Structure formats: C-alpha cells, structure tokens
Amino acid sequence: MPLIMFASPKGGVGKTTMTANIADALRRNGRRVMVMDFDPQNTLRLHFGVPLTDTAGFMADLPKRPDWRNLVRQTASGVMLLPHGAIDIRGALGLSSALERDPELLAAPLRAILADPGLLVIADTSPGPSHALNLLAPLASMVVAVLMADATSAALVPEIENGRFLGAGTMAALFAGRLRVVLNGVDPNARLSRASAETVARHLGPRLLGAMCREEVVAEALAAQRLLLDIAPTSRAAEDLREIARGIEAALPAVPDGLQAGWGAR
Ligand SMILES: Nc1ncnc2c1ncn2[C@@H]1O[C@H](COP(=O)(O)OP(=O)(O)OP(=O)(O)O)[C@@H](O)[C@H]1O
Ligand SMILES: [Mg+2]
C-alpha cells in the first residue's frame, strides 16, 4: 500500500539508481515490492536485466488504457517492475495532453495498484515538473529527493525543504512534511563533496535519510544490468544503500502479518 516516490528538481543525480537498488534492498528485507517507471527515458528496467529490445510499458501505452497487470514484469530480483515503455515525441505530447484532459487515466490504475495492502510501491520520476509528479505527490507516503553532493545541492536545499518542487502554496507545505532527502555521489576524499555533504546534513538534520558514496561499482552494476547488492554486496556503496533502506523501512508501516513476500522468487 505505501507509495514512495524518488524525485528531484535536477537530472542525473541517481534517482533511477536509488529506486532500483533501494527496491532490491527492501525486497531482501522481506517486503513485497513493485517499482514503477514514470520517466520517458525508460531506463529503470535496465537495472533489472530487462533486454534493451524489450520496450513495452505502461505509461507509453496509457492513452490506450492498458491493463497494468499485463505489463508487470516479475524480475529475477523478486521485485515486480512496471516499465514506462519507449515513447517518441508524438507519443510524449499525446500522453501529456491525454493526462491534462483526463488525470483519471493514471489516477484510477494508481489507486488500484495502491489498494494492495501488502505491496510497497516505489516510483521513479523524471527530473523537474511533470504530470506524473503532480498526480503521485498527494498519494505518496514519502517523497525521497535525491541530491548530489556538489555545490548545486546546497543551493537546492531551500527549494526541496519547502516542497516547492512538488507543488505551490498550501499543497507545497503539505508535501514538505513527507519529504526526505538522500545524498548521492559523496566522495569523502574530495574537499568540495565533503563540505557540501556536511552543509546539507547540518541543514536537514533527521530529514536526511542517508548518503551514498561515489563508487565505480555502482555504474558498473548498471552496465552489467545487475543490482548492486547482487554484484558487490560488500562494497561501501552497498553498505550505504542498506543504511538508507533501513531509514526508509523505519519510517514505513510494518509489513502486515501474513503479507510478507515469500523467498521463492530469489
Ligand atoms: N553513487 C554512485 N557512484 C557512481 N556512479 C553513480 C552513482 N549513482 C549514480 N551513478 C551513475 O550516474 C548516472 C546517473 O544515474 P541515474 O540514471 O540513476 O540518475 P537519474 O537522477 O535517474 O538521472 P535522470 O535525471 O536522467 O533520470 C548513471 O550512469 C549511474 O550509474
Ligand atoms: Mg532517472
């Protein structure tokens, strides 16, 4: 039932990497997890080993009102995946105007997915404003903003903190209460990275869920279309990831009795 949304006003900060690997970590903790890709780049699937040539997906087909159940992939990790699907410029414009006209096109299947009481849904979004972000934000139990440990991240903290990147006025204030932050790409040996991470941590206090170090194996995992905990479970980044997953887990309602995931799929 809970929805966690990874979002950021800035691109290339590690949202998709976090979505995929945190989902895997939470699945390993016994959660039944589904990830949904709301980004037209359609790359979340690559972390789960879906072939490049397999381009079918939910959002790309949305104007045709597909049954999402037929598009869910059962991945080797045990995490269920609803890919975005490949979309060209015409498709993207068509999707945007269809959602503008009829938000229920997405809201109705989302409600159906979230009605499953034992399911944890994790959404990956595109950077910046989008229809999907507007529709997801009010439904999310937690919005995790990903920031890079660089000079820009410190500048973005106020915008993240007041929820303005998710809405305006009172809505922004409402969403701000559900906002948590993860720092990515921290390099403890680089002065600027360390300084910006420390500034953000001081400013955000407990709203900072954790930090993940910059480590080549994170990018290598994606290149191999594998998950980090699979290929480098003892790496520093894997330890960081488990720590962030623990922070998220602590903020979520406990898995209802009898609704834990079985381990057969692993
Ligand atoms: N901690 C890390 N260490 C090393 N490389 C990383 C790390 N986190 C992410 N990367 C790499 O950085 C690149 C961008 O990551 P990712 O695609 O997850 O960002 P994103 O925020 O989803 O981007 P977009 O805004 O385009 O959707 C990828 O190649 C990924 O492998
Ligand atoms: Mg992404």
Image (cartoon, helix red, strand yellow):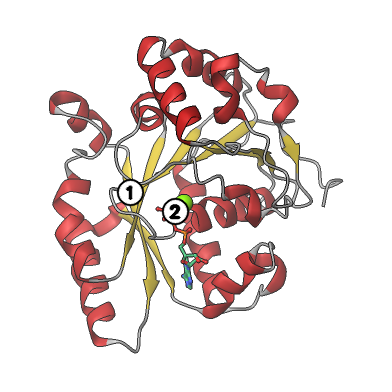
Left or right: 257 as drawn, with respect to 253? right
Q: Does dot 2 land on a helix, a strand or a loop?
A: helix
Residue 245 in view: no
Q: Residue furthest front?
A: 90
Q: How many marks?
A: 2
Mark 2 or mark 1: whose residue is earlier in sequence:
1
Q: Is there a contact, CB below 8 Å, between mark 2 and mark 1?
A: yes
Q: Which mark is residue 15?
A: 2
Q: Which mark is residue 8?
A: 1
Residue in the image at 68% along x and 17% along y: 67
Q: Residue furthest right?
A: 264
Residue in the image at 22% along x and 57% along y: 204
Relative vertical location of residue 48 with respect to residue 143 in this rendering, above or below: below
Relative vertical location of residue 6 with respect to residue 97 in this rendering, above or below: below
The answer to which quarter of the image holds residue 188 is: bottom left
Badge 2 amino acid: Lys
In-front residue for pair 80/106 = 106
Badge 1 amino acid: Ser
Report the quarter where the N terminus lies.
Answer: top right
Tell me if mark 1 has few (under 14), some (14-19) or many (20+) residues whose alpha carbon lies within 10 angstroms of its own.
many
Q: Percent position (x, y) of residue 110?
A: 53, 21
Residue in the image at 43% along x and 16% along y: 98
Cα–Cα span, label 2 and label 1: 7 Å
Would you say the beta carbon of the disc 2 residue lies within 8 angstroms of ligand 1?
yes
Would you say the beta carbon of the disc 1 residue lies within 8 angstroms of ligand 1?
yes
Residue 91 in view: yes
The answer to which quarter of the image holds residue 37 is: top right
In-front residue for pair 160/210 = 160
Left or right: 261 as drawn, with respect to 194? right
In-front residue for pair 59/155 = 59
Residue in the image at 44% along x and 40% along y: 5
Relative vertical location of residue 44 with respect to residue 143 in this rendering, above or below: below
